[in-house]
Image (cartoon, grey):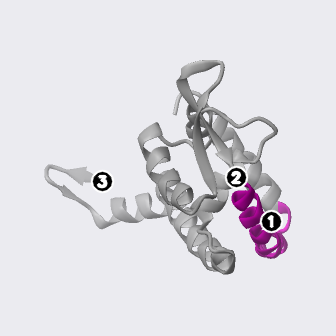
Amino acid sequence: MSTGDSVSFECTARVRDACMCLLVNRAARKLSRLFDDVLAPAGLTNGQFSLLMSLNRPTPPRMGEVAEFLAMDRTTLTANLKPLMRRRLAKVVPDRSDKRGRRVNLTAAGRKALAAAVPLWETAHGDLEQIFDRSATALRADLQRICRYQDL
């Protein structure tokens, strides 16, 4: 409980143990570190892997589509794209159908980097699937529902 300008330890413990945001953030940081280590031999971080994977489409996506899919603002997307562009793994080009828009292309080097990273990801992901067994399916479904929820 909170009184005046202090918060009880009981309240702290309740938030620590029940706050979905805190728990998801803690789990995300642990998984991020795990996948950063796993993907390091391919020269990618987990964030770069996710970003490159989001570009691996038949048609290069618009910047806004990528930002929405990754649940980040366009400024953050641009900042995350810069190192990939410097390494020539991705490039941003004008949208031919709307000159004001921009599309993000996965380059041949980007496809090669993904091809090197996918087996590493598959092994680590398979290990996680075994550890969590059936609960992995339920967790994934719950997380996907959170991602689709419009009021957040």
- Is residue 124 one of those drawn in magenta? yes
Amino acid bearing label 3: Met
Q: Quadrant of residue 70?
A: top right
- Element at badge 3? loop
Q: Give the extent of the magenta segment.
A: 107-134
Closest to the camera, between mark 1 and mark 3, is 1
Q: In this rendering, is residue 147 above or below 119?
A: above
Q: Name the chief secondary structure element in magenta.
A: helix
Image point (59%, 36%), residue name:
93
Image point (82%, 75%), residue name:
123
Image point (47%, 38%), residue name:
74
Amino acid bearing label 2: Thr
Q: How many marks?
A: 3
Amino acid bearing label 1: Ala
Label 2: how many Cα within 10 Å (few below 14, some 14–19, many 20+): some
Label 1: how many Cα within 10 Å (few below 14, some 14–19, many 20+): few
Residue closest to the eye, 69 or 147:
69
Say whether residue 115 is left or right of residue 97: right
- Residue 39, percent from left and from top: 67, 74
* Farthest-out residue, top: 98
Q: Compute the Cα span from label 2 to label 1.
A: 12 Å
Closest to the camera, between mark 2 and mark 3, is 2
Residue named by callout 2: 107
Residue named by callout 1: 115
Residue closest to the eye, 70 or 25:
70
Residue named by callout 3: 1
Mark 2 vs 1, N-terminal side: 2
Residue closest to the eye, 6 or 23:
23
